[in-house]
Image: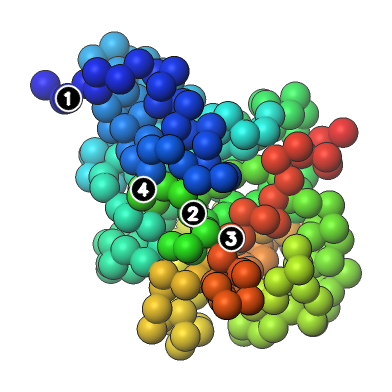
């Protein structure tokens, strides 16, 4: 029988609440996903306290969706297997689950929380670098993008190609590399692999990287994505937190 934590849910969520300062419990996401959500889904057919538990490919390749207590519309995708973060070799394994594809498919949770269907270009997925996160478990943030980020990408669409290049404007005060990716869904395109294959510095040290997948409608009307890669620079005060491009107040929904 799966192990159940003896900690009450309120205590787990209290650890999560400390996230943006410094998490009191850096394992709280794993404890919620592994010790609460997965057992409850298996035994009671109820994902609570998560919004959903997906074990269709088995627990080793599954994931849960958890409503983050920061913001009204932010959700987290967390693997049901232990994956440390963006630097984990598991994310680049040949048979790795496409966690970004699963996160994009779950964006309806953001719509439901916002009480309206948001255009694809308003939604972004973000994973922080090893230095920009407070949790020891891999997680992708699913939420609205900041309006100025949406506009910066839209206005520079003509100059963004399928090759990585430096975005000519800073976002949230930091430099990002950008490329486009066509298609309404991510399908078999794994953003982690595109990052590692396209940027040698990323392949050499993924721990420094932060990666954001922003929904897009290109100038020709076709759907796709902008991939944004940033790099931690602790000496410059940049912790590599692509989550900074998201707006957890979801101003675009208002």
| Viewer can see residue 108 | no
Q: Specify the label residue 133 is tagged with.
A: 2
Mark before the other along the chain sequence, 2 or 3: 2
Q: Specify the label residue 137 is tagged with.
A: 4
Residue mark closest to the camera, 1 vs 2: 2
Q: Is residue 46 above or below residue 113?
A: above
Of residues 17 and 161, the one drawn nearer to the viewer in this rendering: 17
Mark before the other along the chain sequence, 1 or 4: 1
Mark 4: give few (<14), some (14-19) or many (20+) Cα within 10 Å: many
Mark 1: give few (<14), some (14-19) or many (20+) Cα within 10 Å: few
Q: Are marks 1 and 2 in contact (CB under 8 Å)?
A: no
Q: Are marks 4 and 3 in contact (CB under 8 Å)?
A: no
- Outermost residue to the left: 1
Q: CA distance from mark 2 to mark 3?
A: 7 Å
Mark 2: give few (<14), some (14-19) or many (20+) Cα within 10 Å: many
Secondary structure beneath label 4 = loop
Q: CA distance from mark 1 to mark 2?
A: 26 Å
Q: CA distance from mark 3 to mark 1?
A: 32 Å
Secondary structure beneath label 1 = loop
């Amino acid at each position: 029988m799966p192990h159940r934590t003896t900690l009450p849910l309120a205590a787990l969520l209290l650890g999560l609440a400390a996230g943006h300062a410094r998490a009191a419990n850096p394992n709280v996401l794993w404890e919620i996903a592994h010790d609460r959500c997965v057992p409850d889904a298996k035994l009671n057919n109820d994902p609570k306290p998560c919004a959903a538990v997906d074990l269709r490919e088995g627990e080793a390749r599954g994931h849960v969706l958890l409503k983050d207590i920061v913001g009204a519309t932010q959700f987290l995708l967390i693997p049901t297997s232990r994956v440390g973060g963006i630097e984990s070799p598991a994310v680049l394994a040949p048979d790795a689950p496409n966690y970004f594809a699963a996160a994009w498919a779950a964006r309806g949770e953001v719509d439901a929380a916002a009480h309206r269907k948001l255009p694809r270009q308003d939604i972004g997925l973000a994973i922080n670098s090893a230095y920009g996160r407070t949790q020891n478990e891999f997680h992708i943030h699913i939420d609205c993008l900041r309006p100025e980020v949406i506009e910066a990408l839209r206005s520079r669409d003509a100059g963004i190609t399928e090759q990585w290049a430096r975005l000519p404007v800073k976002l949230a005060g930091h430099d990002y590399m950008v490329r486009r990716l066509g298609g309404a869904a991510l399908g078999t395109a794994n953003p982690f692999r595109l990052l590692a294959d396209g940027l040698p510095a990323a392949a050499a040290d993924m721990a420094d990287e932060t990666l954001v997948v922003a929904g897009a409608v290109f100038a020709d009307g076709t759907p796709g994505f902008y991939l944004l890669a940033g790099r931690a620079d602790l000496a410059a005060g940049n912790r590599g937190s692509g989550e900074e491009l998201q707006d957890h107040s979801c101003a675009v929904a208002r």
